[in-house]
Image: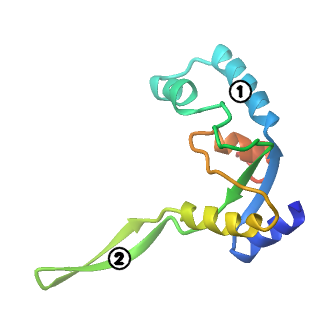
């Protein structure tokens, strides 16, 4: 199943890793040790104390794994717009289409009786590094 799921992500130009949900607990422990040993500024404290969530989200089904996705996209796109007859060229930030990704994964998994639910505010970079999906420099 994991191989098929990775192939489905690849068809859409994405990369995917699956990790056991228990990995989230070990990352929480790592971050607690980090907080004790580092002199963090206010922004860093906000991230590790308030932004990150380590609880498994309620989903109406048992959550066994975390699916991490790398969704490539450009950082910005050229945009042209017209205001009062004058053409303006500018750059705009580009965001990944998370809803599209969630939909195609759910569509793929539905026939196999699996479900996914997106989660926000997880320590995604740390999870991605632990899964082998990313490398911190």
Quadrant position of residue 125: top right
> Residue at image x 49%, y 62%?
95
Quadrant in which the N terminus is drawn: bottom right
The earlier-in-sequence mark between 2 and 1 is 1
Quadrant position of residue 109: bottom right
Where does residue 58 sit, x and y in percent of width and height? 64, 38
Q: Is residue 18 visible?
A: yes
- Please name which of the two marks, 2 or 1, marks the residue nearer to the observer: 1
Depth check: give the residue in front, 32 or 18: 18
- Residue, disc 2: 79
In the rendered structure, the answer to whether residue 41 lies left or right of residue 9 reads: left
**Badge 1 local density, few (<14 within 10 Å), some, or many (20+)?**
some
Q: How many marks?
A: 2
Where does residue 128 sit, x and y in percent of width and height? 73, 47
Q: Residues under labels 2 and 1: Cα distance?
A: 41 Å
Q: Residue furthest top?
A: 36
Depth check: give the residue in front, 107 or 99: 107
Regarding mark 1 in the picture, which secondary structure is present there? Answer: helix
**Colour scheme in the image?**
rainbow
Where does residue 42 sit, x and y in percent of width and height? 46, 23
> Residue at image x 66%, y 14%?
36
**Badge 2 local density, few (<14 within 10 Å), some, or many (20+)?**
few
Which label is found at residue 28?
1
Q: Is residue 132 visible?
A: no
Quadrant position of residue 14: bottom right
């Amino acid at each position: 199943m994991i191989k098929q799921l990775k192939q489905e992500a690849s068809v859409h130009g994405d990369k995917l890793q699956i990790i056991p949900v228990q990995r989230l607990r070990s990352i929480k422990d790592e971050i607690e040790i980090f907080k004790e040993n580092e002199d963090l500024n206010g922004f860093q404290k906000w991230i590790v104390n308030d932004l990150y969530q380590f609880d498994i989200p309620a989903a109406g089904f048992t959550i066994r794994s975390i699916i991490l996705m790398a969704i490539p996209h450009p950082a910005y796109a050229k945009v042209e717009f017209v205001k009062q007859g004058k053409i303006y060229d500018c750059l705009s930030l580009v965001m990944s289409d998370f809803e599209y990704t969630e939909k195609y994964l759910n569509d793929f998994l539905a026939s196999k009786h699996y479900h996914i639910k997106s989660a926000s505010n997880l320590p995604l970079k740390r999870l991605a590094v632990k899964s082998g999906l990313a490398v911190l420099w």
